[in-house]
Amino acid sequence: DLSRKLNMELSVLKREKELLLNSEKRALDEVQDLSQRLYRLQATLDTIQSAEQVREEARVAERMKQEEYIKQIEREWAEAKKELQDERNNVRNLTLDRDNTRKDAMRQLEDMGKELAA
């Protein structure tokens, strides 16, 4: 009965570990996606900022359009940067949670082993 209980607890711990690993992988994938998005947005911003000059009247109208677009890109870039930092923090927290869960599981297994030995 104790062995069955230990096996069930071990199965639960393995499932929790698997869930944490899957969550961590998803978070890492999200960080990678956000990093790529951030680089694309920065490249777009650089391209816009280095555009060639055109005739004066068209240049003024185009500059106004570009400034609005740049503001939008900068807002998106700042948002993507914040999301990236949030995801990095999330990964860090998930890693800590995983490590703590692993330590707790090992501690529980050791305690159960001591109980079985006693």
Image (spheres, rainbow, N blue to C red):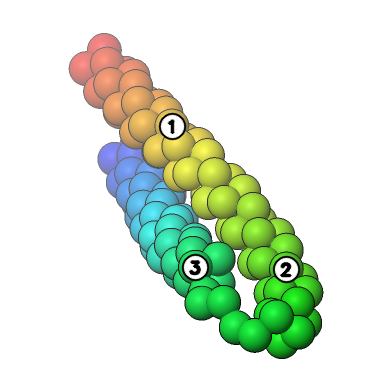
Q: Which comes before the other along the chain, label 2 or label 3?
A: 3
| Cα distance in 3D space between marks 1 and 2 | 43 Å
Q: Which comes before the other along the chain, label 1 or label 2?
A: 2
Note whether 25 is above or below 64 in the view shown: above
Q: Nearer the viewer, residue 104 or 117?
A: 104
Residue 1 numbered mark, or none: none
Q: Is residue 95 left or right of residue 89?
A: left
Q: Nearer the viewer, residue 77 or 19?
A: 77
Q: Is residue 91 left or right of residue 7?
A: right
Note whether 94 is above or below 59 in the view shown: above
> Where does residue 113 sit, x and y in percent of width and height?
25, 23
Amino acid type, mark 1 = Leu
Residue in the picture at 71% in, 74% down: 63
| Cα distance in 3D space between marks 1 and 3 | 43 Å
Q: Quadrant of the C terminus?
A: top left
Q: Quadrant of the N terminus?
A: top left
